[in-house]
Structures are given as C-alpha cells and as structure tokens.
Amino acid sequence: MKNPLFRHADGVWPNTAALAFTVLGWPLGIALLGQAHWAWNVAGVLLVTLTLTWSAYFIHEFAHQAIFRTPEANERWGVLMSWINGSAYARFADLRRKHMRHHVERADVLTFDFQRFLRERPLLRRGVLALEWLHIPAVEFLMRGIVMALPFIDERKRDARGRILGVAAVRLAAWVLLAVWSLKALLLYALSYLLFVHLLRFADCFQHTYDTYPILDETPIPKDKLRDRAYEQANTYSDVVGLDAKWLNLVWLNFGFHNAHHERPVAPWHQLPALHRQLYADDYPQVVTVGELLRAYHRHRVTRVMAENYGEVRPRGTPHRADTFIGAVGVSFLTAV
C-alpha cells in the first residue's frame, strides 16, 4: 500500500479497534443510561466514562500526529473527539499548539492563572476549596469555564466568540434532548462526566513537577534554569497501575507510561509499554504506581489547589514514598488554549 492511512504499520488493528470502541461505545453507553434495570445503568456509566476518557487521550495522540499518516486526518479525528468529550470550545489547533509548548519548553504553559484569580476572590476561593474537599474537581470545571469565557473577556481571542456560542448551542440542545428522553440518563451522564474528569485529573496530577507559567500568547517562558532532557526525565513520572497491568493501564490508554512518552513523543499509545521496558529498568525511580498515589490524591486534594509547588517523591524503598507528592491541578491539555 503506497499511502497507508495509519502512521505505524503495527497500529492498524489496535487503533481501528480502539477508535471503533470509542466512537460506537459512547452512544451505546448513553443508551444504557436510560434503561430501566440498574445493571444496565451501571454498565452505561462505566462505558461512557471510559469512552470519554479514551476520546480525551486520543486528542493527545492526534496532537502528536501519532495515529494517522497525514496531519489533516489527525486533526479531523481530533475535532471529532473534542465534540465527544466537550472540549470543542477550544480549537484543536490551539490545544495542539499549547501542548507542543509543554514538550518543547519543558514546562506547564497554561492559559489562565487560576491561583491568582482565587486569591483575589476569597469567597469564591472558599467555595472552590469546599467543593474540592468533597472530591468535586471544581478547579477543572473553572478552567473549562475560562475556555468558554475567554473570548468575551480578552480581545486577543474575540474571533472565537461565534464558535463558543455555536458549540454551546449544540451541546445545550443535546443535553435538553437527553433530559426529554430520560432525566435519569442525564443525571447518570453527569456522574460519568465527573468520573471522567477525575480520571484525567489523577493522571495529570502526578506526571510532572514542571514549573507552571500562565501565558495566553506566544511569550516564551523565562530562561531561569537549564531545562534539558535530563531535567525533563527527572521531573516526569510514570503513574502506571503496574508495569505488567496490561488491561488496567488501558483505562488511561497507556498514558501512564509518561517517561517513555516524553522520551519519544511520536510513539503511539500501543507501543508505550514495550518502549518503557526498552528504555528503563524495572526499578526506575520515576515509576510511581497508582496504588502509591491514591492516598496522596485524597490527602492533598485541598492543599494542591493553592500550593506553590508540587511536592516530591521519596526514594524507592521508602514507606509511603508518594505521600509528600502534592501534585498538580488545572493542567489538563483539554483546557490549555
């Protein structure tokens, strides 16, 4: 075949299956949410949550042009996935541009300084912290709201106003139709979306201890330290369920093998476990398992909102070595435009 559709020959079947599961599983899951029996509802919540999660990580894959051979195909599919998970308020090109800065400049380059915003509004800050204490990811929803509001409060983004209104109208109409069909399905979809945001946030939370810079335009980050490949690997963590937890790592589409991803950003999701094994020893100190991180995720859920740094991971062999890892918040690639 002279012009293959997929970028990697070994990706034809994995990507065909995973994309079909995402695109077809999402509406099937929604249909299950409205069924009478609770078992179908549970299956629907799990299916919607997983397909929303995969749609987000496929946006990441398409941003790296790791799936299809041509940039145009990656962008078309990236736009489709953004409509599934609700990130279509931002242009795919903007999401890709900001994420590439994350890799090139080795920093978390954000759109909005939410910490400053909350410091200046004590009442709102208390409300956000209260919601975070209840395990409601208020900061992530605040960041999504900023993506929608930004064109109306910053002249540099005013050309996106029509797009925001159009996307909002379509999505609102879809929510109304879902409610008319089944109010239960609407409520369960909201639950699924909440779980989806938590899954993304957990992964984002513990993958880097990079410096954070809220920069809307193309202003470069300060050259205040050497951010070379050694810095990149030392400030990147692989938050996997386990190195051999093949199926559970797929919940995040292998996104947990993050050191391997940063070492070779164009390697697609289905190659990352083998690439990790090729690059790193079993006792690689940057590997921190989900089991080690769950307690830190819960313990620091309020602290990390206004924390000045991400904390640290203790050496391997230290009991509860991830307990001092505060983690990041508000750094999702879906809200960096």
Image (spheres, grey):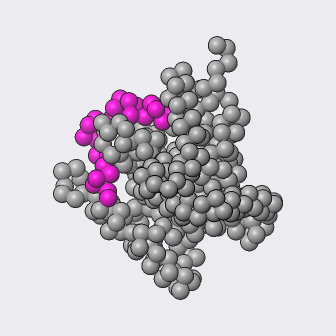
Q: Quadrant of the C terminus?
A: bottom right
Residue in the image at 63% along x and 55% along y = 87
Residue 316 appears left or right of 61: left
Residue in the image at 42% along x and 52% along y = 39
Q: Could you tell me if residue 105 is visible in this image?
A: no
Residue 35 appears left or right of 215: left
Relative image position of residue 119 (x, y in whole percent): 53, 80
Relative image position of residue 209 (x, y in whole percent): 42, 57
Nearer the observer, 120 or 294: 294
Residue in the image at 43% along x and 56% along y = 38
Quadrant for residue 306, please give it.
Answer: bottom left
Relative to 138, is 124 above or below? below
Q: Quadrant of the N terminus?
A: top right
The question of residue 119 being in magenta is answered with: no
Relative to 89, is 255 above or below? above
Residue in the image at 58% along x and 32% along y = 67
Which range of residues does the magenta coloring cover? 266-294
Residue situated furthest top in the rendering: 1
Residue situated furthest front in the rendering: 36
The question of residue 284 being in magenta is answered with: yes
Quadrant for residue 8, please give it.
Answer: top right
